[in-house]
Amino acid sequence: MVAFTKGHGTGNDFIIIADPDGALDLTVEQVAVLCDRHFGIGADGILRVVRSSAIADGAAALAEEPAAEWFMDYRNADGSVAEMCGNGIRVFAHYLVRAGLATIEPGSTLPIGTRAGVRDVTRSATGYQVDLGRWKLSGDDPLVRVDGLSVTRPGLGIDVGNPHVVVALASEFELASLELHRAPELDPALPAGANIEFVVPGEPLVRDGVGHVRMRVFERGVGETLSCGTGVAATALAVRYWAGESAPNNWQVEVPGGTLGVRMFPAEDGEHVALSGPAQLVFSGEIDLL
């Protein structure tokens, strides 16, 4: 039997499994079954809570930040390994705090290892804020074909630790018309795939110095989800890029599961992007790994 906790951030849900010493070796098939909403617990992915010293990928995290005791071993619902998850890391931090494995005092920072590097988590007015680090235009700007739209649309490639392609839509009607039951097609295809976000601006786009947009997302290895934290950050970055130099650095992004905040700010190594929002733990239990 394996103990687990179910949690979510704006409806993006995860199975959290504590494995501090790295003794558990989850297969692709086991992850897929656990995440199956009919035959398993059901989730968009799995967060394995493991010490950085107990997982091979944690060596780079400890070299970057020796205080990064915990590593977020994130797996998509299909069992594939992912670099980073913006909603997941807030849920991960919330679990660490609730389980007594870490503390985040007001004004303090909790460093967490990920395959995209160490990410710093702090408390925020809405729950938790994570510094996603430097972002960049990836240079991958494929055309995107998706069910529900009659013509392909250009996408903007953005890297926030994992790959994204953001597509601007003309109206709320187009956003509602998307049929994301299967993966949108990218031309050219990206070798590692990407999360694909579809966005419409708020009316007006900027209110009281804060940008407002709505989006839906298809996550690689998962499907459409109610929210994608790094996708929210990529969406805000893309819209600011399209809007030009007068666009704000603070954004509110509405997703089907709620609203998240995005902030861009300068750092020593370049501009960073931060994501803030809630994290909740729903229930705990035990399950057999078949």
Image (cartoon, rainbow, N blue to C red):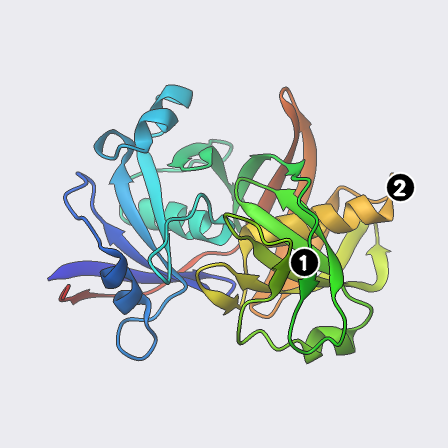
**Residue located 42% across and 22% down the image:** 64
User: How dense is the environment of label 2, judged by Cα within 10 Å: few (below 14), some, or many (20 and up)?
Assistant: few
Q: Quadrant of residue 246?
A: top right
Q: Amino acid at mark 1?
A: Val
Looking at the image, residue 192 sits to the left or right of residue 149; the answer is: left
Mark 1 secondary-structure assignment? strand
Mark 2 secondary-structure assignment? loop
Q: Amino acid at mark 2?
A: Ser
Q: Quadrant of residue 248?
A: top right
**Residue located 42% across and 34% down the image:** 110
Per the model, the C-alpha gap separating discs 2 and 1 is 18 Å
Q: Is residue 280 above or below residue 67?
A: below
Residue underneath mark 2: 246
- Residue 175: assigned label: none
Looking at the image, residue 277 sits to the left or right of residue 32; the answer is: right
User: How dense is the environment of label 1, judged by Cα within 10 Å: few (below 14), some, or many (20 and up)?
Assistant: many
**Residue located 68% across and 62% down the image:** 144
Q: Residue furthest front?
A: 188
**Residue located 84% across and 54% down the image:** 206
Q: Residue furthest left?
A: 1
Residue underneath mark 1: 253
- Return the disc, 2 or 1, that comes first in the chain's sequence: 2
Q: Is residue 67 above or below residue 6?
A: above
